[in-house]
Image (spheres, helix red, strand yellow):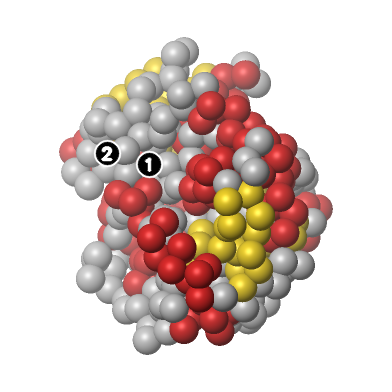
Amino acid sequence: MRILVIGGTWFLGKYVAEGALARGWSVTTFNRGRSGRDVEGVETAHGDRTVREDMQTLAQLGPWDAVIDTSSSDFSPRTVLLAATALRRAARRWVHISTVSVYQDWPHQPLADESPLLDCPPDADETYGYTGEEGSPTKYGFQKAGGERAVTEAFGDAAVFLRPGVILGPEEYVGRLPWWLARAKRGGRILAPAPGEQRIQPVDVRDVSAFALDQVASSTSGGYNITHPDGVTFEHFINTCLTVTGGAGRPVWTAPDVLNDHDVKQWTELPLWRTYAGVWKVDSSRAVAAGLRCRPIAETIRDTWDWLAANGRPVDHPRWAEHGIAPEKEAKILASL
């Protein structure tokens, strides 16, 4: 196999490139060369996906069996359309990393692969969409839905869309799991969102990568929800963080209304906590039937801690600073309970 990875230098893109090489495939990566390092053994091409001439030059390096686009998150549908149009004669398939945010009902209702998507034109610019009063839908979701339509317009039934919820694992740049690990290591009374039996469905970056690579050789098309089919309870998640870090902490399970009364920001100040009914009820059975295999989340937690303990550092990203409650605020809430 010969594939093109758009991105390919950090987190998911890096794992995709490394995984493809491990399968004996030929890999070209395309990125701006500004963050992360090119994986040893790939053919590198540097350029800007927003520049038509750069994409036309890239197309001349083909053909490829597939494109795997891991870096569309920060780009408008129009930019995705530019890339897909430029590369449609240079690649047989397109595997697109999307998100569950493309669904109309996320995170309010349980989701299946057939759930309706947000409506966004394939040539929309970065201004299209809006974020609702309760934080849903999001402008980000509209933009990603438009990106899917852009790829479909160019590749039709040769396009595959992977829609993860939350991706965790070594080299995570958002900071969700690293924050919980650092908090567990610090110990003491830990503000924890009740109920502890709430199940969450994050997936390991390495499992997403493996499934994306499997789709290169597949003949399927359409969307796949990528969420952990078994999940883990929040209690087990935090207790595992305590175990792997050796932290002498004790979770203080606190009701959602109490957390809301103290203006604790869902999703960020207590990462992975959100009260909408459908956040962690995303059906991934179609992906499982197609070969998605998810390792136990405890393994993801342990391996991420091993990476951090070995001085692991992700690429710098502004989202890292958004995650985690300030110690002073946490202490004030705990003292009031």
In this picture, is 146 found above or below 226?
below
Residue type at tag 2? Met
Quarter of the image for residue 323 reads: bottom left
Q: Which disc number belongs to residue 87?
A: 1
Q: Secondary structure at mark 1?
A: helix
Report whether 302 appears left or right of 103: right
Report whether 85 appears left or right of 228: left
Quarter of the figure that contains the N terminus: top right
Quarter of the image for residue 305 reads: top right
Residue type at tag 1? Leu
Horizontal and vertical percent for residue 288? Answer: 78, 52
In this view, the residue in front, 195 or 85, is: 195
Instruction: Give the total of numbered labels.
Output: 2
In this picture, is 58 found above or below 282?
above
Q: Which residue is located at x 30 percent, y 49 percent? A: 318
Distance, label 2 to label 1, CA atoms, is 8 Å
- Closer to the chain start, of discs 2 and 1, is 2
Disc 2 target residue:
55
Quarter of the image for residue 246 reads: top right
Q: Are marks 2 and 1 in contact (CB under 8 Å)?
A: yes
Q: Which residue is located at x 47 percent, y 13 percent? A: 41
Check disc 1: other Cα within 10 Å, few if <14, some if 14-19, many if 20+.
many
Q: Which residue is located at x 50 percent, y 62 percent? A: 270
Horizontal and vertical percent for residue 59? Answer: 33, 33
Q: Which residue is located at x 52 percent, y 48 percent? A: 183
Q: Secondary structure at mark 2?
A: helix
Report whether 6 appears left or right of 235: left
